[in-house]
Image (cartoon, grey):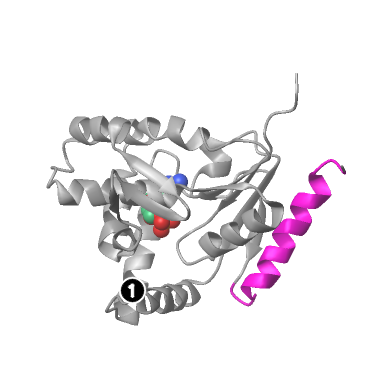
Amino acid sequence: MSDPTPVLTIDGPGGSGKGVVSREVALQLHWNLLDSGALYRALGYMLLEKDVDRADIEAVTKIAHTFPIVFLNDQVYLEDDNITAEIRSERVGAVASEIGVHEPVRAALLDVQRSFAKSPGLVADGRDMGTVVFPQAFCKIYLDASPAERAKRRYLQLKDSGFDVNLAELEAQIVARDERDKTRAVAPLKPAADAVVIDTTELRIDEVVAKVVGIAKERLPAD
Ligand code: C5P
């Protein structure tokens, strides 16, 4: 039997740089990319759009099993609607975090996430990639940075995308979201026991990318 598809997981809190680092690492390795946060956000967006009662876990889980999400050329669609920009708001992020505490909702999203593990390899970006979704990953990275630095990065990102944001409010929202992600009973945000933890507070993106690609290449069989 041939070896399974190699999976490199990159977990960490919002603003730790995992999104941009994962994208760049996937480009350099010529591997597929899973942005699992976009999946939780798209589900949150759909619940808001359809005005679904988020306390009704059965209804939310049903939608999570069937919602028509498509990832294509770096864009996220719900059927024909391109929702790439809309899902980046803090409001949608907060709903994603709210529904992510429920085990049945998380379980409903497992198959679609695992379906991204295709040859020649996968870079999986999220909160529980190394701990729950891909525990067999050959390389697990956990990125972190101080809350103030993460808020600053998110602020610049959101401003760039045309959102009207306030830095102090953003830092408070980020800390609240971290707290919920880290303390939830199911799949809490934490480094896997075998993860390499990198503090990116003082590092540039290209330095983090080089570190991650270096660690991955050391572990991959030479071809
Ligand atoms: O990474 P991003 O900020 O896009 O994720 C939005 C929210 O989705 C997170 O705060 C988290 O609550 C949830 N999420 C999750 N598990 C993942 C990815 C995201 O619970 N693997």
Instruction: Give the main secondary structure of the magenta stretch.
Output: helix
- Specify few, some or many for label 1: CA neighbours under 10 Å numbering under 14, 14-19, or 20 or more: some
Judge: label 1 CB < 8 Å from ligand 1: no
In x, y percent, where is residue 184? 38, 45
Q: Position of residue 23 (x, y in %)?
A: 57, 58
211 versus 110 height, above or below: below
Where's the N terminus, which quadrant?
A: top right
Residue 102 is situated, as x and y percent measured from the top left of the image, at 31, 37
- Label 1: which residue? 170
Q: Is residue 181 visible in this depiction of the protein?
A: no
Residue 51: x %, y % from top left: 12, 47
Residue at image x 42%, y 51%?
37
Q: Which residues are magenta?
A: 201-222
Asked if residue 209 lies in the magenta stretch, the reply is yes
Q: Quadrant of residue 167?
A: bottom left
Choose between 113 and 130: the one closer to the eye: 113
Tag 1's secondary structure? Answer: helix
Residue 10, above or below 193: below
Q: Is residue 116 visible?
A: yes
Instruction: Name the quadrant of the C terminus.
Output: top right
